[in-house]
Image (spheres, grey):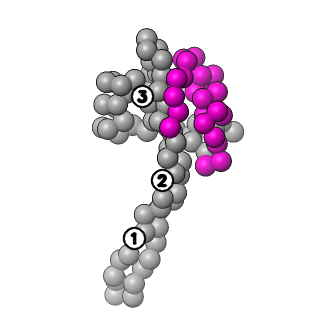
Amino acid sequence: MSILIKPIITEKATTDSEINNRFSFVVKRGANKIEIRKAVEEAYGVSVTDVRTINVRPDRKTKYTKTGMQVGKTNAYKKAIVQVAEGDTIDIYSNL
């Protein structure tokens, strides 16, 4: 199983990739920065200069219904922001 789960394609992540050459991925929760660096370099054939990781907490949601209060939450995940060397680029849309 790969460390990289999927790329993050949002307006903020796309702008960051176009301007600053940084790409965002959802990664396994147990992965560290060295493993993420190796996985990106092998998968896309680029050289990685910096890796930043973020543990995204679950959002708790409450609904009031006729049957009572319903409580739920979203899943927690780990996000990695990868800085690629100048001149290299990742074509995320080719793998979708």
Residue 66: x percent and y percent?
34, 87
At a point 45% along the width and 21% down the height, the residue shown is 91
What are the residue bounds of the magenta stretch? 29-52
Residue 79: x percent and y percent?
50, 44
Instruction: Tell whether label 1 touches label 3 (CB within 8 Å).
Output: no
Residue 65: x percent and y percent?
34, 83
Camera-side residue of 88 and 10:
88
- Compared across the picture, whether 40 is left or right of 94 comes to right
At a point 30% along the width and 37% down the height, the residue shown is 11
Camera-side residue of 68 and 79:
79
Q: Which of the 4 image quadrants contains residue 32?
A: top right
Identify residue type, mark 1.
Answer: Lys
Residue 6 shows in the view: yes
- The label number, if any, that marks residue 56 in the structure image: 2
Q: Nearer the viewer, mark 1 or mark 2?
A: 2
Check if residue 8 falls in the magenta segment. Answer: no
At a point 48% along the width and 22% down the height, the residue shown is 84
Identify residue type, mark 2.
Answer: Val
- Judging by the rendered image, the residue that carries numbered circle 1 is 61
- Judging by the rendered image, the residue that carries numbered circle 3 is 22
Q: CA distance from mark 3 to mark 1?
A: 31 Å
N-terminal of the pair, mark 1 or mark 2, is: 2
Q: Residues within 10 Å of mark 3 (few under 14, many from 20)?
A: many
